[in-house]
Amino acid sequence: MPVAGPQATPAPPPPASLLPVAVLLWLAGVYLRIPVLVAPPLAPFIGDELALSQALTGALTTLPILMLAVGSMPGSLAIARIGPRNTLALAMIIMVIGSAGRGLVPDTLSLMIASAVMGIGVSMMQPALPALLPRWLEPHHLALGTAIYMNGMLMGEFIGAGITLPVLMPLLDDSWRATLLAWSLPALLVAAALFLPKRDRARPVRKVAWLPDWHNPLTLRLGLLLGLSGSLFFGLNAYMANLLQQQGQFHRLADALFWYNLAQVAASLVMLKMARRWIGRTGVIATLASLSILGAIGAIVFTGWWSIVSATAMSLVAGMLLISLVAIPPLVVNAAETGRLSAGTFLVGYTVAFLVPMVGGLLADWTGDARHALLTMIAYAILVLPLAFTLNLERKKGQPES
């Protein structure tokens, strides 16, 4: 009987053993967005009790988005020092402290500090998830793993924005503080459950680089394209009310936002089905980026329901583009470099997703035309679109074909 030597490769786990991992990835993905997107529906109640100005009320949503960029580097450092699983658990605990803390704050300053802490926790989770995939999944499951946790993230967007006011808040005596606690505290159970799979429990035996590798062209290129998707989605979401009001269609705002955010869920379901075929394909990325721009253009060229349909189509395609871009790092670099590349792309992407809509909003305020906010985002998207056609997604040795 042959005896396995030290170079023997362990047998891949049976498919049934992947289900708990898939569930954990999905739940972690949900908490990439729920803490951020429960703020808009609760903002009027928070603003009334704490006497927030319009700018500070808006900051409940925009500040965490800015933190999504700022916290990417601490996440990358933690991945290099304590590993992706420990980083993800730590990040979720930080997120809970900040998110639940918002429900306990006595004043505006502490509310903003808690919101920033929550944003940093979420931002550290972002690079930890793609860095964890090669440690938990077989190479041919990497694209599917990304699609699973991104499905959780986009479902979290819809769940947080969609059921907070009509379902959860009435169950909690219409208390915004209790609602924030109810959304936040279950994440502690998810953080603890991350240690149940008997995979990759060992602390890294050597230190690895954690700062973004700016010599790798993918860091900047993927980041700028991520900014295309993020600025169009977050920007149109933010200025939808102004745009519809200018078109005389403000009474359709609730329906428009419902379908707009539901389209992100549909995007994640499509990518779950098509992950193996589409992820890692330059042509798919270029096509999705182009269609996102066309959808945004349609939202301002058309009026009434056609404008809403075009915006919804843009949300659908931008969500698919987001998943396609986030899935690339574990496919094209080795496991030790995945967190580093992911953190760099998130740093660039969310900085753009924060700055471009803000500049567009300032321009719209100056001109008095809400369309100029969206035109600013479209102009940026057109400027970086050529990057989508010239991406070099050649896989390093040992990386799988998707």
Image (cartoon, grey):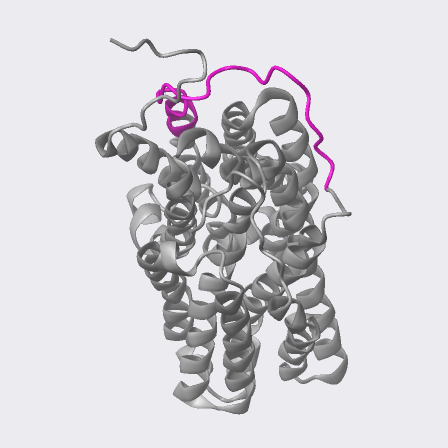
Is residue 183 one of those drawn in magenta? Answer: no
Viewer-closest of 296 and 390: 390
In this view, 246 is above or below 339: below
Is residue 194 one of those drawn in magenta? Answer: yes
Q: Would residue 19 be found to the left or right of residue 108 on screen? A: left
Residue 230 image offset from top left, x and y in percent: 58, 61
Residue 239 image offset from top left, x and y in percent: 57, 72
Q: Residue 172, located in which quarter of the rendered image? A: top left
Q: Residue 377, located in which quarter of the rendered image? A: bottom right
Viewer-closest of 310 and 111: 310
In this view, 104 is above or below 6: below
* Number of numbered callouts drawn: 0
Residue 127 image offset from top left, x and y in percent: 57, 39
Residue at image point 39% right, 22% down: 9
Residue 118 image offset from top left, x and y in percent: 58, 38
Residue at image point 40% right, 81% down: 309
- Quadrant for the N terminus in the image: top left
Residue at image point 54% right, 90% down: 301
Task: Find the magenta span and give its range.
Answer: 189-212
Q: Would residue 265 be found to the left or right of residue 378 on screen? A: left
Q: Predominant secondary structure in magenta?
A: loop
Q: Is residue 250 visible?
A: yes
Q: Is residue 53 visible?
A: no
In this view, 342 is above or below 54: above
In this view, 177 is above or below 150: above
Residue pushed farthest left? Answer: 16
